[in-house]
Image (tube, helix red, strand yellow):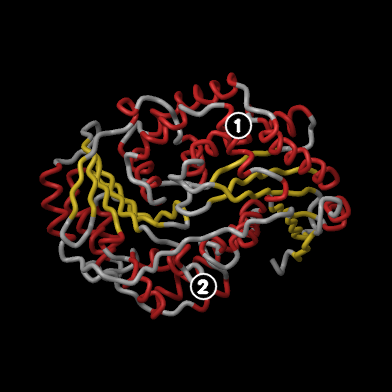
Amino acid sequence: MTKSTLAITIGLLLTLSVASADEVFPQYTEFTLANGLRTILIEDHRQPTVSIAILFKTGASSDPPELAGRAILTGHMMKENTRNFPGNELLEAIDSVGGIVEISVLTKDGMSFDADFLSRDISLALRIVSDIVINPVFTEEALERMSRRLISINFQTRSVAQYRLMDALYNEIFRECGYGRAALGTRTSLSGITLDDINVYFVNHIRPENAILLVGGDINPPQIQKVVSGYFSGWIKGGNRPAAKYEPAFRDTLQIILIDNPTVPSADFMIGLPTAPVGSPDFPAMLTLNYVIGGGGRVSRLYRSLVEEKGLASIVTSELDWARNHGMLRIWGAAPAEIATEAIVQAMSVLEELSSLRVPQKELDETRNYFRGYAPMLYENVSSSMDQFVKFLSTGVDLPYQAELLKEIDMLTPVSLQSAARKYISRDKMTLAVIGPKSSLLPSLSTLGMVTVIKLEEE
C-alpha cells in the first residue's frame, strides 16, 4: 500500500462521506491470537494480489523529548535486517517475488508496516512481515546509516515552509509532550539515539497486544488464519506503555510566531486551533466545518474570499487532524509579504463568521453531496480500504465507527455546526505562525498582538 503525503491528506479530508454503509464498507472477519494479536481479514478475489498491514498503536507521540524520532527510526531499522533474513537477504526475498514492504506514519499516534504481494506468495509475505516485527536485528552500522538518512529527510522536509510552520504550531500548542514533538525528530535528537534506546522502544512497543494485523485481497480466510497462527503465535506479549493523554495549551489570547526569512518576498502563514479528537461528539461537526472552511478547495469559504474575491492570497486551504487526543484545525496560506497580514486578518474573519452566522442549509447539503460522491472511491479496492481501516484504528476508534461517523454527519444541522464553531473557533484561541521577511511583516503583525520572532537558522 504505497502512500504519499498528498494521498494521505486527501484521504483524511474525504473519509467522512455519507453514503450507505452497506454500499461503502467492505465486509471483514477477524480473530485474535492467544498473545493478543488482533487480525482482520478482507476477502476480495477481483485481483490476484494481497495487501498486508500491521499497525502499532503507539508512535512518535510516545517518544520523550530528548529521543524525538526514535519510533520512526526503530521502524526503519526493523526492516533492514532480521534473524531469518540477515543482511541483504530480506530485500532480496521481497524483490524475488516482486513484493513491496514499506513503513508508514499516518499520525503521531501510531505507525504501520505495509506490504503488497501476489496472492500466490502470501505465505512468504506473512513470513517476511512476521520476521520484521518479531525478529529484527539491530546493529550500530544500521543505526548510524538510518540516522543519517532521517536527518537528511528531516532537513529536506523543513525546507518546505508548510512543514516548518506545522512544527512551530505543534510545539507552541502542545509543547514538549506528545504531539508537540516532530515525528522525524531533530538533528540533535536523532544523533543522540543509541542502540539501547532502539531496543527499549522495541521491547515496550512492538508487541502483539499493541498491534493489529490486517490481511486483504485474494485470500482464503481459514487458510490465512492457520498461516498467521503459525508465524505469529510465538510473538511474546509484554512491554511497558504508560497511557498518555496529550492536552494542548488552551489560550485566552492570540499567539503569534514570526520566523524571519529575509531572503523571500512572500510569506506563508498557518493558523492553528486545538480541536476535538476522533470519536468525540464534536468530531463530525468539525470535519464538516473543515470542508466548509478550506478543505473543499475552490468551493470553500477561504478560497472564495481570499483568492477569488479579494486577491489576497495565492493559495489557502485547511486541514483537520485525525488524532487520538486533541487534534488541531490548521489553516495554511501564502501571500505577498506586504499584504500577508491583511490576508491573515481576512482568514480569521472567515473563521469567526461561523460562530455568528449559521451555515446555510443549502451549503450543508452541498457539502454532504460532495462527500457522498467520494465515499465509494475511498473503499474501491482492498488497498484503499485497508488504508481507511488503519487510519481509523490508529486513532483508537474501532471499525464500526466508520459507519457511525457517516450517520452522525448526516444528522448535523446548521445549529449544531454553529455550536461547534463557538466552542472551538475564536481569535483568542488561535496560534498564528508566519514565515517570511521580518522587515515587511513585523510592523503589521504587531497590530494583532505580541509577536515572538525566531531567526530561520535558530528555528
Q: Name the residue carrying label 1.
A: 292
Which of the two discs, 2 and 1, labels the residue nearer the N terminus? Answer: 2
* Residue found at x 69% / y 66%: 459
Q: Position of residue 157 (x, y in %)?
A: 59, 57
* Residue found at x 76% / y 58%: 258
- CB contact under 8 Å: marks 2 and 1: no
54 to the left or right of 245:
left
Q: Could you say which is closer to the camera, residue 228 or residue 145?
A: 228
- Kind of residue sitting beneath label 1: Val
Name the mark on residue 312: none
- Kind of residue sitting beneath label 2: Leu
Q: Position of residue 160 (x, y in %)?
A: 64, 54
* Residue found at x 47% / y 77%: 193
Quarter of the image where one finds residue 24: top left
Q: Name the residue carrying label 2.
A: 190
* Residue found at x 20% / y 41%: 29
Q: Position of residue 451 (x, y in %)?
A: 80, 59
SS type, badge 2 = helix
Disc 2 versus disc 1: nearer the observer:
1
Q: Residues within 10 Å of mark 2 (few under 14, many from 20)?
A: many
SS type, badge 1 = helix
